[in-house]
Image (cartoon, helix red, strand yellow):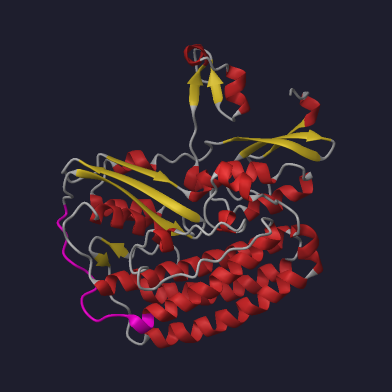
Amino acid sequence: MRYSPEGMMPFGPVHPSLKEPEYFKLILEGEKIVQVIPRIGYVHRGIERAAQERTWTKNIYLFERICGICSFHHSLSYTEGVESLYPFEVPARAKYIRVVVAELERIHSHLLWLGLVGHWAGFDTLFMWIWKDREHVLDLEEEITGNRVHKSYSAFGGVRKDLPDGIAQKVRAELGYIRKRAEYYRGLVQSEETLSVRTKGVGRISQDTARRLSPVGPLLRCTGIGRDVRAEDPYAAYDEVIPNVQTSTGGDIASLLVLRIDEVLDSCRMVEEALEKMPAGPFKASFPRVAPAGESTYHVEAPRGELFYFVKSGGGSTPERVKVRTPTMANLLTATEMLRGHTLADVPVVLTGMDPCFGCMDRVAVVDVDRAKEWSVSGEELRSYGIEYYRGRRS
C-alpha cells in the first residue's frame, strides 16, 4: 500500500520526548498511525571498532560507556565473556557481589523508567517522587563501587574492590524503604485515573506478536512469556540466588508498570538474600592480561532485557572483535508494532514504554541499489524496512 506525503509525519530525530536522536516515519490516516518506519544510525559511536585498539582491561571502561543506566551489566557481560576463555574460576564471593550490584542497578533503572512513564503520561508528581526515591539506590551504588553511574566495578577475575564494612546493614535499611515505596506505587499505578487513561490498552502486543518479533526483557514478559537469562542460563551467582521471574498478561503499558514494580520488589529480595548468603574469601582472582585465543558468546539479563556480547581473541593483548547486541535493538520492531492503531499523542508514552536506549543500539545500513538488484531487492523495498540506500554514492 502506498501513502501520499500528506499521510506521513516525521517524528524526530530531534523531539522533546526523545532524549537521544532517532527518526521515525509515521504513516497516518488522519491521526491514526497505520505504519511506523524507523531510520536508525544517528549516534553510531564506533565503540566496537575502538575496542580493537585497546587492551582487554581498558575495554571494560569503554563498554561501560555504551549505556549510563545499565553500565555495570555491559561490563559484567564483557568480563564474564572474556573470563570464559580462561581455564580459571572466579571466586564465589565475587560472584555474589556481582549479583548485589547488578540487582541494585536493575532497581534504579526500573525506577527511572517508572518516573519517565509518569512524566509522559502527564503525572509529573509520580516522576518527582520516584526521582527522590531513586537517589537512595544511587547512593548505595556509590558507596559500594565509588561511582553512581559508570561504576568501573567489574574486573577480570571478580570485582575491583570488596564490599565496604557495615554496608550490609545500610543496604537492608535502604531497601526496606524502597520496598515500602514500591508497594505504594504498585497500588497507585493501578488506581490513578491519569495513568489509567494514558496506559490501559495503549501499546498492547499479543503473545503471537511477541513470538514473531522476539522482544526481550519486560517487553516480552508483559505478554505472559517468562523468559529471563538469570533463570534460564544463570551467570554470576544466579544459580544460588534465584530470581522469581515476573510476568503479566495484559501486554500494554499498564501491565508493564505493574510488572516492573514487581521486578523491583524481587530485586530487593535478591539483594538481601545475596548479602545473607555472602561467602567469605577473596573478591578477585588473578587473571593473565592476555586472553587465550578463542571465541565466546555471552549474555546477561540487563534491566531492559537480554544483552549479548561476542568476543574473539587471537591470543594478543587486544581483542580481534567484540560485537554487542543491546536489548533496544531487539525491541525496536516490537515498539513500531505497538504504535499501530494509536494516535500521535500516544507516541511518547509507547516509545518510553519500550524503555529505549538509542545510543546503545544505533547502527546504520547503507546498500547500493545496483548491487541490491543482484539479490532481487528493490530500493523501495529496502526503504520500506527503514534501510537507507544510495545509487552510486551515499545518500
Quadrant in the picture for residue 377 = top right
Indicate the quadrant containing the N terminus: top left, top right, bottom left or bottom right. Answer: top right
Q: Position of residue 371 (x, y in %)?
A: 47, 13
Closest to the observer: 31 or 213? 213
* Residue name at image x 55 percent, y 75 percent: 265
Residue farthest front in this picture: 208
Vertical position of residue 37 compared to residue 287: above or below: above
Side of 87 relative to 232 (left or right): left
Q: Position of residue 57 (x, y in %)?
A: 25, 54
Quadrant in the picture for residue 286 = bottom left
Vertical position of residue 104 compared to residue 21: above or below: below
Q: Which residues are magenta?
A: 275-289
In the rendered image, residue 319 lying in the magenta stretch gets the answer no
* Residue name at image x 62 percent, y 19 percent: 380
Residue 129 can be seen in this image? yes
Closest to the observer: 30 or 237? 237
Q: Position of residue 123 (x, y in %)?
A: 75, 65
Q: Position of residue 160 (x, y in %)?
A: 27, 68
